[in-house]
Amino acid sequence: MRYIVGSMAALSVAAALCAPSHAQRTAQPSERSASAAPVKVEPALDGVFGAFENYPIVALGDAHGLAEQMDFYSAVVRDPRFARDVRNLVVEFGASSQQYVIDRYLAGETVPYVELRKVWNDTVGWVPPPAMVGLVKFFAAVRDINKTLPPDRRIMVWLGEPPLDWTASTRDEIMRAGMARDTYPAALLRDQILAKGEKALVIYGVGHFAESPMLKGLLDATHPGAMLAILPYAPPFASPGCAPLLPEVTAIWPEPALATRNPGGATAGQGGCFTMSMPLMGPPSGAPGPGGPGPGPGGPRGPGGPGVGAGRQAEFAGPGPGPGGSSGSGGPGGPAGPSALEGDGVLFLGPLEKLAQGPQGPSEALAQGRYLPDYLFDPELRQEMKRRSDLVGMPLLPPPPGLAIRKVDYDFELDAPGFREHIERIFAAHDRDGDGVITDSEYDPLD
């Protein structure tokens, strides 16, 4: 996903993980010898909930657009252990200015689709907005779960993108908000989670889990060792060091597997899995000029943190699996950051060649219908997105070649009045041959 502002830095966590399973099953050899082995491999859900026994914050580094990973997020919140033991989520793919909207939606209230979609469309650092089908389904999954829970036990989703009123903001205000894409969630975690003795699952692009001035580094400065970060085994990350672990991992597949370091264990061989390389891409010609560091908004109820613009990379190139989609954000036009990422956990969702992503950018993801069709096919939203792009000096993402927008991909229950009608209108206007697929020849330019 293209970022208005972006960054990438090394991810460093020194942590241990202990994850007893709640299921009755025979322990695998890797689990029985976990105390002696440098690396522990186990079913991912057990590993994540085991981590919460030792860490108040567990972070899943998002590859932005990986279908299997988005499905895993829904599996985590559907597990009874989440509502019982954790309850809080802090996510990058929602605008904090719309926190009241998502609160109402997740509480089971009736929220029209045109209002609900502001949750993902009003984010600061995503171009196009993170309207990925898997993430929208994730919100719907939390809503379904909350309907079964008493009000005081419902899952709370905290939207981590800094607050911004897109209807009235200037370019400078937009850029300042972009500079707070790490200070804001760091303050949120301090003030709303750690200060209250609670726990939270964090879902953010992997680049945010690096040293200061990124999210994890900012949190480590005040609460060292509070966060355990898990990297994805997914494109475009180069992870040849994971090869020695694959025999144990494949014994768990198709269920997702999690590999974590054991404290004090040797890290030779298997430990190399936790250092991954990632391609870097700088701003294209004509991108906005350097943005200086500056204080961004603080947490929801706390003071602002330090400015985060210095020494950070602008990443305009790519959604999803690309560097722009996996990293954090910062001052546009800054120098490139390091390409190495290091963590204490790796999430294995399946063989790299079978993951439903590949090395693709925003055009490919849009063309394949991984996003809601609004960005391309809703004239009102398209016009608003162009206005926002013009404000920050970036082009609107053009209609991609190879369109194959399938109606069946949006055949899910969002429980937001107007959503189904919205999809029907789009296909009625563009699917000229009525086969349920909108192709290049059927697309009418809206800009």
Image (cartoon, rainbow, N blue to C red):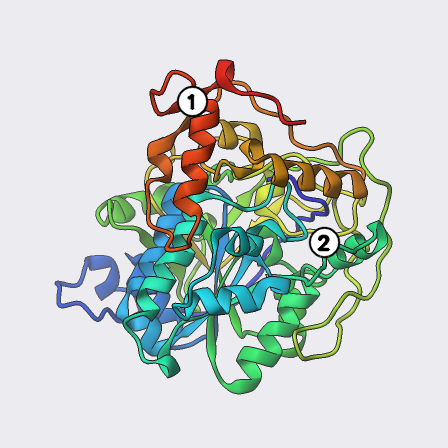
Whether residue 17 sits left or right of residue 366 in the image: it is left
Residue 419 in the image: above or below residue 430: below
Closer mark to the observer between disc 1 and disc 2:
1
Indicate the secondary structure of the residue bearing disc 2: loop
Identify residue type, mark 2.
Trp
Discs 1, 2 touching: Cβ within 8 Å:
no
Identify residue type, mark 1.
Asp
Q: Where is residue 2, by image quadrant?
A: top right
Q: Which residue is mark 1?
A: 431
Res. 191 visible in picture: yes
Indicate the secondary structure of the residue bearing disc 1: loop
Badge 1 crowding class, 10 Å Cα cut-off, few under 14, some 14 to 19, many 20 or more, is many
Q: Which residue is mark 2?
A: 166
Which disc is residue 305 wearing?
none
Residue 58 in the image: above or below residue 245: below
Residue at image position (54%, 19%) is 401
Q: Earlier in the sequence, mark 1 or mark 2?
A: 2
Residue 406 percent coordinates (x, y): 38, 28
Residue 107 in the image: above or below residue 401: below
Whether residue 71 sits left or right of residue 283 in the image: it is left
Badge 2 crowding class, 10 Å Cα cut-off, few under 14, some 14 to 19, many 20 or more, is some
Residue 123 percent coordinates (x, y): 63, 53
Residue at image position (74%, 40%) is 387
User: What residue occupies the far bottom of the structure in this picture?
Assistant: 196
Pick whichever, 48 or 204, lies toward us.
204
Pick whichever, 50 or 77, lies toward us.
77
Residue 394 percent coordinates (x, y): 76, 36
Whether residue 270 sits left or right of residue 20 in the image: it is right
